[in-house]
Image (cartoon, grey):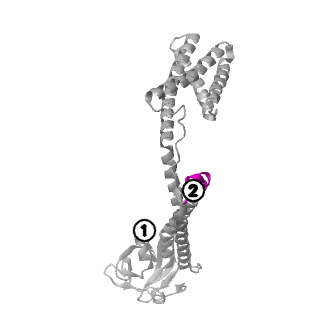
C-alpha cells in the first residue's frame, strides 16, 4: 500500500516528499519532538541523521552500493535515545521508502544485470563467429579430415626465399635490398636532371622501379609501399633543409641527405628481409604440424561450440527474465508523493 497524505495529522511526523536520495517529514507543531532524529532499520541500524529546518526534517539517504540491501527493510524514525517517533499513516511496523528502493535496485541490480546481458550477448556472437570460421576452414581443407581423423599433410618443396640459415638469409636480403636501394639511387639520378621538378620526378621514378622489382618477385605493390616512398622523400627534404641550415650548399646538402637516407633505407631493408626470410622458413618447416593442429582445433570447435552457445542463450534468457522481474518489482503508481509503503501491508 502506498500512503499519500494530505491535511492535518496528530502524529508527530507527516511524510511530505520522497525521492531516491531523501525523505522529508513535516513536524506537528503541537507534538513534543526531540531535536535529534535518526532514520533507522527496524532492528535499530542507523541509516541517516535528520536535518531540522523550520517546520520539518529531511533525511539524506545513502546511495552507495553497500546500502542496497537496506532499501527493502522496514524503517522507523527514532530519537537519539531510541524512542520511536510516530509517522502519520504508519503503525509501529514501520515503512519502506519506495523511491529509494527503486532507485538503488535499478542502479545496482539493474546495472549488474545489464553487464551480464552485454557480456553474454558478446560471447554468443564471438562463439557463433568462431563456429562459422571453423566451418569455413574445414570446407577449405576437407582433405585434412579423413574418416573422422585429422591428417598431417606432406611438406611441400622449400620456397627459394625461405632461409634455413643466417647466411642464406643475409644473401637473399642483400640481393633484394640492393634492388630497393638501386631504385632509390635511380630516382635520385632522374630527379637531379629535372630541375624544379626533381622531387616529383624522383618520387615517380623510384615508385616505378620498386613496382617493377616487386612484380618480378611476385609481390603486390601496396599502399604501404607507396607510403614508404612518400616518407623517404619527406625525410630527404627534412635532412636537406637541416644540412643547408648548417652551412652546406644546396647541391651538397641534397647529395649528403640523399646518401644518408639511402643508407638508412638499406639497413632497414636488410633487417626486414632477413627476418621475413627466416620467418618464411619456419612457416614452411612447421606448416604440416600447424595444419594438423588447426584441423584438431576446428573439429573441437565444431563439436563443442553448439552446446556452449545453447548454454549461453539459456543464461541470457535467465538474465532477461531477471530484468523483467526487477522492472516489475520496482514499478509502482507514480502519482503525487510521498511514496511510502506501510510494512504491515508489504
Q: Position of residue 171 (x, y in %)?
A: 49, 24
Q: Position of residue 337 (x, y in %)?
A: 55, 79
Asked if residue 105 is among those painted magenta in the image, a careful observer would answer no
To which residue does mark 2 refer? 134
Asked if residue 210 lies left or right of residue 104, the reply is right
Residue 117 appears in which quarter of the rendering?
Answer: bottom right
Secondary structure of residue under mark 1: helix
Q: Which residue is drawn at 68% across and 14% down?
A: 194
Assess disc 2: are there few (<14), some (14-19) or many (≥20) residues with their C-alpha within 10 Å of its C-alpha: many
- Expressed as whole percent of the image width and height from the top left, the position of residue 332 reads 56, 80
**Quarter-of-image position of residue 215:** top right
Q: Is residue 24 left or right of residue 195?
A: left
Given residues 211 and 116, the one toward you in this image is 211
Range shown magenta: 133-147
Q: In this view, does 115 lie to the left or right of 83?
A: right
Q: From where the camera sits, is residue 28 visible?
A: no
Report the disc number at residue 195: none
SS label for mark 2? helix
Label 1 vs label 2: CA separation? 43 Å
Question: Would residue 43 be seen by someone viewing this image from the given angle?
Answer: yes
User: With respect to residue 96, does 311 lie above or below?
Assistant: above
Residue in the image at 61% along x and 31% along y: 225
Task: Give the overall secondary structure of the magenta segment.
Answer: helix
Give residue 118's position: percent from left, percent from top: 54, 63
Measured along the vertical axis of the image, is residue 4 above or below residue 255?
A: below
The residue at which mark 1 appears reads as: 65
Pick the front one: 286 or 40: 286
Name the N-terminal-most of marks 1 and 2: 1
Q: Which of 139 and 95 is in front in this view?
A: 139
Amino acid at each position: 500500500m502506498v500512503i499519500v497524505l494530505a491535511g492535518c495529522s496528530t502524529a508527530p511526523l507527516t511524510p511530505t516528499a520522497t525521492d531516491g536520495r531523501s525523505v522529508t517529514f513535516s513536524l506537528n507543531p503541537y507534538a513534543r519532538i526531540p531535536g535529534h532524529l535518526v532514520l533507522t532499520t527496524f532492528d535499530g541500524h542507523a541509516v541517516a541523521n535528520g536535518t531540522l529546518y523550520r517546520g520539518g526534517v529531511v533525511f539524506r539517504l545513502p546511495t552507495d552500493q553497500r546500502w542496497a540491501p537496506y532499501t527493502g527493510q522496514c524503517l522507523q524514525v527514532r530519537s537519539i535515545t531510541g524512542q520511536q517517533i510516530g509517522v502519520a499513516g504508519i503503525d509501529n511496523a514501520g515503512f519502506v521508502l519506495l523511491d529509494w528502493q527503486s532507485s538503488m535496485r535499478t542502479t545496482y541490480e539493474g546495472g549488474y544485470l545489464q553487464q551480464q546481458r552485454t557480456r553474454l550477448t558478446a560471447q554468443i556472437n564471438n562463439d557463433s563467429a568462431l563456429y562459422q570460421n571453423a566451418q569455413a576452414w574445414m570446407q577449405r581443407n576437407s582433405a585434412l579430415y579423413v574418416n573422422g581423423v585429422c591428417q598431417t599433410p606432406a611438406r611441400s618443396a622449400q620456397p627459394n626465399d625461405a632461409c634455413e640459415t643466417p647466411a642464406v638469409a643475409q644473401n637473399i636480403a642483400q640481393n633484394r635490398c640492393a634492388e630497393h636501394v638501386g631504385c632509390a639511387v635511380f630516382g635520385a639520378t632522374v630527379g637531379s636532371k629535372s630541375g624544379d621538378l626533381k622531387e616529383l620526378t624522383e618520387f615517380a621514378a623510384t615508385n616505378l622501379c620498386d613496382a617493377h622489382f616487386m612484380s618480378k618477385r611476385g609481390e603486390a605493390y601496396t599502399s604501404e609501399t607507396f607510403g614508404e616512398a612518400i616518407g623517404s622523400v619527406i625525410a630527404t627534404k627534412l635532412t636537406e633543409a637541416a644540412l643547408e641550415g648548417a652551412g652546406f650548399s644546396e647541391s651538397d646538402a641534397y647529395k649528403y641527405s640523399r646518401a644518408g637516407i639511402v643508407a638508412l633505407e638499406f639497413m632497414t631493408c636488410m633487417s626486414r628481409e632477413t627476418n621475413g626470410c627466416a620467418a618464411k622458413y619456419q612457416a614452411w618447416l612447421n606448416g604440416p604440424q600447424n595444419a594438423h593442429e588447426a584441423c584438431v582445433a576446428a573439429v573441437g570447435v565444431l563439436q563443442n561450440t553448439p552446446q556452449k552457445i545453447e548454454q549461453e542463450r539459456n543464461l541470457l534468457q535467465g538474465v532477461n527474465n531477471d530484468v523483467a522481474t526487477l522492472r516489475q518489482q520496482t514499478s509502482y503508481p507514480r502519482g503525487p508523493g510521498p511514496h511510502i509503503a506501510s510494512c504491515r501491508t508489504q
